[in-house]
Image (spheres, coloured by chain):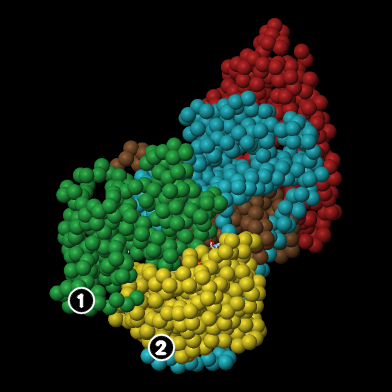
Chain colours: A brown, B yellow, C red, D cyan, E green
């Protein structure tokens, strides 16, 4: 093997391991911080306690896990179709000038800080949703805004994936008189499936990890939600809300919720990527 | 009858084909010959509006079908392309099973129930002499076929739709002689029912197959048709020097 | 909290150098940031970095030595006696409603029953016919501690509709929800009211909620804003704390809608 | 070989397909308009509330009165420095990792699967946890303190999965024929990569970087605990520096009556994004790259 | 001399070529002919280890260069491939300028300074008769060339490196007759200096060009070499029935 290749191999593999190590280090750190609580309180109490009142020794995380899942999955349910449609729009439906604009707009959307989304949701959207009852700070508002936030992730990756679909196949299909949607559905989407799936997973994990906007919009009450209009607190919001003030044992409990969040993410990632493994 | 009048094609403003006027008739084969890069593929793509798919491509001039503007004859691009089939230079099977490659467009055009689809598929594969090779792996990916097999599959896919016009862009250039001959025979047998326009670099093939030949040439960087007429007349007694020298070289 | 050493300032005005890191209460941070700017102008070689994160973090960082000084918006608890608090200002916690809400005042019992979900409609406490949206603070907040202590409410019995973190979050929630009630730092609320934000502070036990009543000591639900150090702060830290407590910064304290504390011995110099 | 012609004049399926076509087109247009509409809504909201505050001195001046007056000069500077640190660490690392995953280790090898899984999980780490981790690791353990370096490194970890994902996809989308051609010319794997594959993948790579920059610029929670809160102009990478998004958060949630300035800062942030996106597009155009739409059939 | 002994190729365990043994000599042209799908491309790819790049491909058997195992002769795959050049069936120019397409590998192998690079580039482009067509757009993307132009560019790119052996997989199938003839002439003129192995479907071309011919055939789904020998001997008097019938059909 030439020296340059050897160097490339070593550097790239070391980089890959380094990238992977980041997550291990973070996990290790979370474990270290969470251990005191896990030893003292035990895992089961996080699911069986009466409520979440850490200062009074009640540590039920279940409502927060549910709220986290509801908002994240809901966000992906909104962002998935819109993002994929937006990728297809750019390549197959938009007039060229509009396609360029659409792309720019989506890229711009990707960079708007979550606080700005949160602010917009709080000042503009929540009062509108308050017409449905309550304060307007509930899971629905958080889900909608979260959906908008992760939309660019799906859209940009779908756009790339669609762009990579082989042109010959598309032309071949067109030459058989297949209509636009048939080409998209039968040729383009199957070809770009793995790229789109990657976008959706990334969006889901991003939704699970988002903190600030949800904190500003979800209402943050720790109760098992009964509808989308119930307020709820996600695991991240919980950490952000309480960590600054938490004393040692409380702090450790918050790390447990961080750990649980990461476990949830890992399970989802592993299950989904098992099923949607691209065929090559 | 499909015909073009003063058809010009440009890419991003650069004209690559100028004022091409030819006509092709049912039951007849028209061959387009000429050196590389003179716009044959571009001409073909303009006929069934595949140029719409190429960014920067622009077509001017008139295309008629049975004497009427093609846009009036066919209600839509899809109908046009269904009736004016096309086979490409590079084989382009879809990344799906061999069977679905053929059935896909059939279903799309609402042709046939399950049994009929099977029959049409088998018929089409037999027509291109692929049946024996693939009948026991119809559900495997078409991408695993060799280049020649892939191209024959693409031809099968197109003729399964029974189009009125068939545009072929060097359909045999990826085939071995035996398969190429079968396709030639196929074209011969189809000529009664179809209008066929074929781009070929094989002058022998052009001579054997075509009733009419259009010779393309590049002049000043722009392609054009330098002569168009009955095959034998052109091959035997062209008055045009370029054409003469090109066609006489029965090489390749 | 006596801190006698005044040598530093006497002999070395202008020569003071070094870097101080402060972390802690988000309520105190904006004020200390302004004070730090003025301090740096006086002592060009000194650098005061003010970080935020919450009172608890300030106390923890000061204890662990991660920060030179912590900031807290509550008094130290009984298990925090290893640290010293240097009060630099006072603040109150006040109940707020939307300005369209006709309610003027609530009794302690009414507040108690609203927050424990026994009263669910404004008409039961003399207001319009509409559901009460209860805005509450997240557990662990200094503001929450002060509120719960004052009304002797057990946090586990509170039924809230929205739980907020920062003061402005609470205010924005009340602004967006006409039938909401919440409680925030009086300083923050006054600043917003001065800017025509549609909220109103409710009186408490007959005392108007304002910086004036906090200053006079009449307002019952008030709290100290302090800098927290270990027992042996550096000379620079001592000098900075002295500056924070001096009358030189009273204009800054007032501009942030807090109440200056003048009774400190050091301030007299 | 007989060919029977059968052109059924009007098939019921055909009509069904026409309707399906209309519905699909309508749906896609609606979705696209929704996306553009909502963004336009958010942007106008920000612009209407913030743009009037912006002028040259706002962009250059120091922060005073907790942000209610003065400008955001030091904040912009800190943001740029944080971003530079972030990109200079994460871009090389991510491209090298993507190369390893696509060209070196083999798609399905154990190592590749492991690394990929780790990255998927990393992508799901909440930003607040990044903040805590960055604080514990870079700020305290490595002794970098509250500094631009700590913040930048934390953000590198955070945008790593996005960059790697997009880079991987970009590299994979380069046709196999290019690699074969290069190999047949006796190019080493490394030159095949750096001279043929990566240039061909550049537009998609750049798109990924833009996405990552967007994410980094937007981050708040992770930066409060790492690069900190200090609004003074940083003198070195070891100084603490407040980023634009932290400034927005502070003004919006902590400073009474800071709303207008928060919106003005948001306007600046969006403008910076526009400039970054525009420059990328321009660079790609100059380089003769840039993705063209796949082929829209004019109907 | 490059030779193979009992070379077999399989994809994902399915053998597609079995026990192929041939030899090609400097100054000589070896043509590989046979129907589509019988493993000619696979054989060629095995010779310069391009099979390493194809997922699932597995090669067994021996390849020798001047009598020594090829792995010992060439220090590395890159050196091997530099010395054993290859041209593919589908044109595969890089997505960069025409000039860089040629210069890339030259620079990589440390050949020439700026001026020399220019000269080599021009020479190579002239050799494939592309110079006149592209000399004023050398800095435009190679992807905008027509199929034939692209293929000629690929050939230019390979011969610019002056390899010892040249493997060509139907290099002319995408060329028009004139260009094809030029390439044929080019091959003729190169034969003195190179060892050339060419896959072709054009039996006339095989006969004109090749000193030796190897006929591939598929038996029981697996490709093999059914006969290998001097061109004229095979064309005139093959004892093998399959070969006879295949070569006699001077069709296509
Ligand atoms: N998509 C495109 N964009 C820009 N220029 C193009 C494009 N396709 C073809 N061209 C140019 O148009 C001219 C004609 O190309 P075309 O493919 O029609 O030639 P051709 O006669 O089919 O050649 P060949 O026999 O090699 O296939 C060529 O100069 C080519 O470079
Ligand atoms: N990458 C691959 N994976 C699996 N099977 C393959 C692959 N490439 C080729 N094959 C199979 O191997 C056999 C031989 O293919 P090959 O391309 O070598 O034939 P060929 O003689 O070059 O054909 P042609 O003349 O059509 O180019 C074919 O049956 C084909 O389906
Ligand atoms: Mg062509
Ligand atoms: Mg082949
Ligand atoms: O941030 P606090 O001042 O509420 O502790």
What residue is at 48 percent from the left and 65 percent from the top?
A: B36
Q: Is residue C38 left or right of residue E229?
A: right
Q: Is mark 2 within 8 Å of ligand 2?
A: no
Which of D80/A128 is in front?
Answer: D80
What residue is at 56 percent from the left and 51 percent from the top?
A: E136
Furthest residue toward left: E239
Q: Is residue A20 left or right of residue B47?
A: left
**Residue D198 visible:** no
Q: Is mark 1 within 8 Å of ligand 2?
A: no
In the picture, which quadrant includes the C terminus of chain D?
A: bottom right
In this rendering, the answer to whether B3 lies above or below D178 is: below
Mark 1 vs mark 2: give the one in front.
Answer: 1
In the picture, which quadrant includes the N terminus of chain D?
A: bottom left
Question: Residue C234, how many percent across, how many down?
Answer: 60, 16
Q: CA gap, disc 1 to disc 2?
A: 27 Å
In this rendering, the answer to whether C43 lies above or below B24 is: above
Q: Which mark is residue E244?
A: 1
């Amino acid at each position: 093997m030439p020296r340059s290749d050897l160097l490339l191999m070593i550097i790239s593999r070391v980089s890959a391991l380094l990238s992977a190590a980041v997550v291990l280090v973070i996990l290790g750190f979370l474990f270290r911080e969470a251990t005191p609580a896990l030893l003292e309180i035990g895992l089961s109490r996080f699911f069986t306690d009466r409520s979440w009142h850490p200062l009074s020794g009640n540590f039920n995380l279940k409502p927060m896990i549910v709220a986290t899942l509801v908002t994240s999955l809901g966000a992906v349910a909104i962002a998935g179709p819109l993002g994929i449609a937006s990728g297809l729009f750019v390549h197959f439906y938009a007039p060229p000038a509009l396609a360029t604009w659409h792309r720019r707009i989506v890229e711009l959307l990707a960079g708007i800080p979550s606080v700005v989304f949160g602010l917009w949701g709080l000042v503009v959207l929540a009062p509108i949703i308050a017409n449905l009852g309550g304060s307007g700070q509930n899971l629905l508002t958080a889900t909608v805004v979260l959906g908008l936030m992760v939309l660019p992730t799906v859209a940009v990756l779908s756009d790339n994936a669609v762009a990579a679909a082989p042109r010959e196949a598309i032309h071949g299909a067109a030459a058989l008189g297949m209509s636009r949607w048939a080409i998209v559905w039968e040729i383009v989407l199957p070809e770009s499936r793995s790229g789109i799936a990657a976008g959706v997973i990334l969006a889901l994990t991003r939704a699970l990890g988002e903190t600030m906007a949800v904190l500003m919009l979800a209402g943050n009450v720790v109760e098992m939600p009964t509808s989308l209009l119930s307020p709820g607190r996600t695991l991240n919001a919980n950490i952000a809300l309480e960590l600054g003030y938490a004393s040692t044992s409380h702090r450790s409990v918050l790390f447990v919720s961080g750990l649980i969040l990461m476990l949830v993410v890992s399970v989802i990632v592993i299950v989904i990527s098992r099923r949607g493994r691209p065929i090559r | 009858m499909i015909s073009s009048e003063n058809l010009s094609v440009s890419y991003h403003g650069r004209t690559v084909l100028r004022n091409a006027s030819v006509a092709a008739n049912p039951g007849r084969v028209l061959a387009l010959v000429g050196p590389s890069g003179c716009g044959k593929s571009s001409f073909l793509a303009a006929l069934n509006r595949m140029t719409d798919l190429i960014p920067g491509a622009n077509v001017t001039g008139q295309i008629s079908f049975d004497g009427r503007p093609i846009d009036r004859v066919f209600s839509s691009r899809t109908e046009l392309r269904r009736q004016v089939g096309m086979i490409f230079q590079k084989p382009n099977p879809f990344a799906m099973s061999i069977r679905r490659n053929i059935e896909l467009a059939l279903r799309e055009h609402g042709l046939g129930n399950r049994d009929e689809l099977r029959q049409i598929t088998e018929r089409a594969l037999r027509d291109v002499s692929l049946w024996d090779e693939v009948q026991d792996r119809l559900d495997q990916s078409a991408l695993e076929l060799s280049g020649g097999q892939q191209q024959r599959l693409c031809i099968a896919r197109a003729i399964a739709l029974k189009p009125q016009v068939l545009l072929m862009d060097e359909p045999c250039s990826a085939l071995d002689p035996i398969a190429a001959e079968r396709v030639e025979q196929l074209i011969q047998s189809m000529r009664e029912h179809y209008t066929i326009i074929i781009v070929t670099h094989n002058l022998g093939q052009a001579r054997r197959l075509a009733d009419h030949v259009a010779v393309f040439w590049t002049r000043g960087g722009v392609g054009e048709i330098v002569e168009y007429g009955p095959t034998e007349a052109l091959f035997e007694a062209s008055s045009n020097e370029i054409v003469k020298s090109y066609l006489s070289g029965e090489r390749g | 909290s006596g801190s006698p050493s005044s040598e530093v300032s006497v002999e070395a005005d202008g020569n003071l150098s070094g870097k101080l890191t402060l972390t802690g209460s988000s309520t105190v941070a904006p004020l200390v940031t302004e004070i730090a700017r003025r301090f740096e102008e006086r002592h060009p070689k000194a650098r005061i970095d003010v970080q935020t994160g919450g009172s608890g973090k300030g106390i923890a960082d000061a204890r662990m030595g991660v920060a030179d000084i912590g900031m807290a918006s509550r008094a130290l608890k009984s298990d925090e006696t290893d640290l010293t608090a240097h009060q630099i200002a006072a603040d109150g916690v006040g109940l707020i409603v939307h300005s369209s809400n006709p309610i003027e005042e609530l009794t302690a019992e009414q507040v108690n029953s609203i927050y424990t979900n026994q009263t669910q409609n404004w008409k039961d406490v003399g207001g319009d016919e509409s559901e009460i949206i209860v805005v509450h603070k997240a557990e662990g907040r200094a503001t929450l501690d002060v509120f719960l202590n004052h009304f002797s409410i057990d946090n586990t019995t509170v039924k809230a509709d929205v739980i907020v973190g920062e003061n402005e979050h609470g205010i924005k929630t009340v602004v967006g929800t006409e039938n909401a009630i919440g409680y925030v730092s009086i300083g923050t609320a006054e600043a917003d009211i001065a800017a025509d934000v549609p909220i109103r502070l409710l009186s408490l036990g007959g005392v108007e909620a304002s910086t004036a009543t906090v200053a006079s000591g009449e307002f019952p639900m008030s709290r100290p804003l302090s800098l927290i150090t270990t027992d042996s702060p550096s000379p620079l830290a001592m000098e900075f704390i002295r500056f924070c407590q001096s009358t030189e910064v009273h204009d800054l304290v007032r501009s942030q809608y807090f109440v200056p504390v003048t009774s400190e011995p050091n301030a007299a110099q | 070989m007989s060919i029977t012609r059968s052109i059924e004049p009007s098939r019921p399926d055909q009509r069904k397909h026409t309707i399906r076509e209309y519905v699909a087109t309508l749906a896609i247009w609606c979705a696209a308009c929704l996306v553009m509409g909502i963004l336009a809504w958010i942007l106008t909201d920000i612009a209407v509330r913030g743009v009037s505050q912006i002028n040259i001195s706002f962009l250059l001046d120091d922060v005073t009165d907790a942000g209610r007056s003065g400008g955001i000069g030091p904040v912009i500077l800190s943001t740029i420095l944080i971003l530079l640190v972030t990109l200079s660490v994460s871009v090389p690392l991510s491209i090298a990792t993507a190369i390893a995953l696509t060209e070196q280790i083999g798609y399905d090898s154990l190592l590749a699967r492991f690394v990929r899984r780790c990255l998927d999980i990393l992508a799901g780490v909440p930003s607040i946890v990044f903040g805590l981790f960055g604080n514990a690791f870079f700020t305290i353990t490595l002794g970098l303190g509250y500094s631009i370096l700590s913040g930048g490194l934390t953000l590198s970890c955070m945008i790593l999965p996005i960059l790697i994902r997009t880079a991987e996809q970009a590299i994979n989308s380069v046709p196999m024929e290019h690699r074969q051609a290069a190999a047949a010319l006796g190019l080493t794997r490394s030159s095949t990569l750096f001279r043929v594959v990566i240039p061909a993948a550049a537009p998609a790579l750049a798109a990924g970087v833009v996405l990552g920059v967007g994410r980094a610029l937007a981050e708040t929670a992770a930066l409060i605990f790492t690069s900190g809160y200090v609004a003074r102009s940083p003198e070195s990478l070891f100084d603490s520096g407040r980023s634009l998004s932290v400034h927005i958060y502070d003004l919006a949630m902590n400073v009474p009556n800071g709303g207008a300035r928060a919106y003005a800062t948001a306007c600046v942030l969006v403008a910076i994004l526009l400039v970054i996106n525009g420059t990328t597009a321009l660079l790609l155009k100059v380089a003769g790259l840039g993705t063209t739409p796949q082929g829209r059939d004019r109907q």
